Image: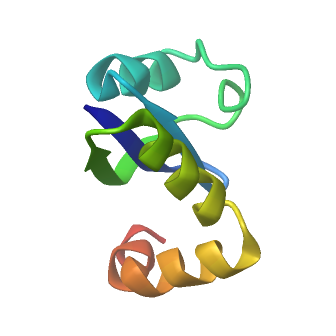
Amino acid sequence: MFYVYILKLANKQCYTGYTANLKQRIDEHKRGLVKSTSSKGPVTLIHYEAYTEKTDAQRRERYLKTTRGKQLLRQQIRDLLNKLR
């Protein structure tokens, strides 16, 4: 399986990524081993999606990083984001 995941960062921003091993990747983020989030911790996993094909996960990640994708994601997890503020 391949996963697209969303992390809530300490600075209230969201980080989108994909991985084949969700548990290990989240652990790496939490331990500060991922360069792009190491200075923005602590991080909280707030959303993930599972795909059987790597290309599907990559395509979804790219979409969620676009302006339109970010808007859709905010609508989908709006209540959760408000709760975490």
> Which residue shows up at 48% across the image and 71% down it?
85
Q: Left or right? Give the position of 28 relative to 49.
A: right
In this view, 55 is above or below 13: above
User: Where's residue 38, x and y in %?
Assistant: 66, 24
User: Where's residue 68, x and y in %?
Assistant: 67, 81
Q: Left or right? Give the position of 22 relative to 18.
A: left
Q: Left or right? Give the position of 48 relative to 5.
A: left
Whether residue 13 is visible, yes or no, is no
> Which residue shows up at 35% across the image and 76% down it?
83
> Which residue shows up at 25% across the image and 31% down it?
1
Q: Left or right? Give the position of 79 relative to 60.
A: left
Q: Quadrant of residue 54?
A: top left
For the image, the number of numbered tags is 0
Whether residue 62 is visible, yes or no, is yes
Q: Quadrant of residue 47?
A: bottom left
Relative depth, front residue between 78 and 69: 69
> Which residue shows up at 48% across the image and 15% down it?
31
Q: How is the image coloured?
A: rainbow
In this view, 3 is above or below 62: above
Relative depth, front residue between 64 and 9: 64
Relative depth, front residue between 16 and 44: 16
User: Where's residue 64, x and y in %?
Assistant: 59, 63
Q: Quadrant of residue 25?
A: top left
In this view, 81 is above or below 27: below
